[in-house]
Amino acid sequence: MNRSILIGIVALIMVATMGAQVASTVEGDLIKLENDWQRAIERKDRAFLQNLFTSEYLATDPDGITFTKSQELANLYKPDDVSSFVLSDFKVNVYCDTAVVTGRNTMKFRGLAGKEEYRFTDVFVKRDGRWQAVASHLSSVAKKSLFK
């Protein structure tokens, strides 16, 4: 009897470990996708973004203005003042075929000293075996918190 309990415990540990490895792999895949998305914007890689965004993709900027997939792709070719941006502080939550990725986006602008800090939330769905972005939201990080 003790031996069967021990075998059961070992089996449960193995299953739990395998589940953690799968979750870790999915998290890593989504963080890589976020970084690939950043590089695609920098290179103005329309084909990558066309495949990344679902047909119903909707982005919301810090001013509350929304952009559809076609508008977001059109904005790719407009001149911008962003000289660089760095993504960090990723947090990934996966819910079956849906995932939410949050993080920090630090941007530098041409002709301006300093940098701007933003928080982002990206929602992904898994369709046809690949992750696609369905919604994005960007918020400015306040210089001072109202709650301190």
Image (cartoon, rainbow, N blue to C red):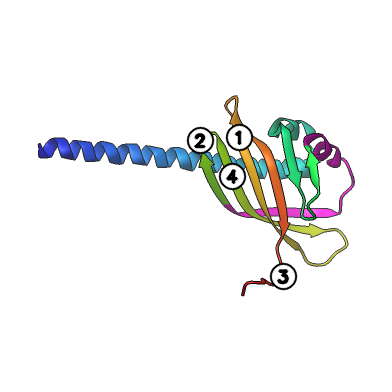
Q: Residue at x 76, y 62 (%)?
A: 116
Task: Decide: is 117 above or below 35.
Answer: below
Residue placed furthest toward the top: 128
Q: Residue 96, which numbered label? A: 2
Q: Are marks 3 and 1 in contact (CB under 8 Å)?
A: no
Could you tell me which secondary element the residue under label 2 belongs to?
loop
Is 76 included in the stretch rendered in magenta? yes
Q: Residue at x 82, y 54 (%)?
A: 82
Within 10 angstroms of label 4, few (less than 14), some, or many (20 or more) residues?
some
Q: Earlier in the sequence, mark 1 or mark 2?
A: 2
Q: Position of residue 49 (x, y in %)?
A: 74, 35
Q: Earlier in the sequence, mark 4 or mark 3?
A: 4
Is 19 included in the stretch rendered in magenta? no
Task: Decide: is 85 above or below 122.
Answer: below
**What is the C-alpha distance between the residues marked 2 and 3?**
36 Å
Give the labeled residue for mark 4: 100
**To which quarter of the image does residue 104 belong?**
bottom right
Could you tell me which secondary element the residue under label 1 belongs to?
strand
Q: Quadrant of the C terminus?
A: bottom right
Q: Are marks 1 and 2 in contact (CB under 8 Å)?
A: no
Q: Position of residue 94 (x, y in %)?
A: 52, 41
**What is the C-alpha distance between the residues marked 4 and 3?**
25 Å
Q: Which residues are magenta?
A: 69-90
Give the labeled residue for mark 1: 125
Amino acid type assigned to the residue bearing label 1 in the image: Val
Task: Decide: is 145 above or below 32.
Answer: below
Give the labeled residue for mark 3: 143
